[in-house]
Amino acid sequence: MSALQNKTIIITGASSGLGEEMARRFAALGANLVLGARREDRLKSLSAELGKNVKYQVCDVSKAEDVQALADMALKEFSKIDVLINNAGIMPLSFFAEKKLEEWDRMIDVNIRGVLHGIAAVIETMHAQKSGHIINIASVAGHVVTPSAGVYSATKYAVRAISEGLRQESRGYLRTTIISPGAVTSELTQSITNEKISKGIDKLYEDAIDARAIADAVLYAVQQPEEVDVNEIIVRPTKQKL
């Protein structure tokens, strides 16, 4: 029997890319899924495809009440929350001189506050269960800063700091994992509005690896015995330098 059989997993940003691939993999292994994203049409289609043990709800992770609603749905439908995957994220890269304050604020709202909202939504349940696993999707940008990625990197460094703080407060039963992808096939680059930066990123992403590689990394962490906590995994294309 799969280690994921009947485990209840919440995934944010589940309508495409990494989140969608994780949902497909975990559903195939018998997990109960609660999927959240902003695009209801994609969630509805994916949920219908994956089966009766997959529920969805429209969710903007920058709104605490939306993320709490996902956790409430998980408890209502499946009576427990085993894993939360804070996957939702955006990457509208820009140079500081462009002063794209709205884009910076949105990255902070989604990439940092979204993670905190996820943790807040499940932490009491996991403490009551004395078990649980919180997986935060960060980035190699949380390890190295490059021109135009200053704000994005700041949000991903924050995700790593939040995850480590959570690990230290884990009380011996809450597992925490950071997954830091490099260039991976997804819609992440589509939010870049600076044409010069966009072209440079497109060049980098010519060597992008499939989202399945990240789903495999998450699956590895989740499938470990309860006494084993895989704290961080970095997954890059072999050709990626930074």
Image (cartoon, grey):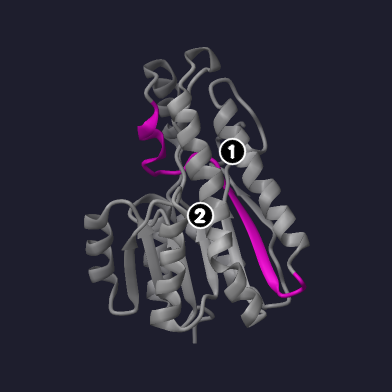
The residue that mark 2 highlights is 214
- Residue 127 location, x and y as percent? 66, 75
For the residue labelled by badge 1, is the local secondary structure a helix, a strand or a loop? helix
Residue 109 visible somewhere in the drawing: yes
Q: In the picture, residue 23 is in which quadrant?
A: bottom left
Q: Residue at x 37, y 18 (%)?
A: 195
Q: Residues within 10 Å of mark 2 (few under 14, many from 20)?
A: many
Which of these two is toward me, 55 or 226? 55
Mark toward the start of the polypeptide (2 vs 1): 1
Can you tell which of label 2 and label 1 is closer to the viewer? 1
From what the image shows, is residue 127 above or below residue 42? below
* Marks 2 and 1, how far apart at CA: 19 Å
Q: Residue at x 33, y 55 (%)?
A: 15
Tell me the magenta residue range: 171-192
* Placement of the C terminus among the 4 image quadrants: top right
The residue that mark 1 highlights is 155
Q: Tell whether 15 sits left or right of 25.
A: left
For the residue labelled by badge 2, is the local secondary structure a helix, a strand or a loop? helix
Can you name the residue that lies furthest to the top here? 97
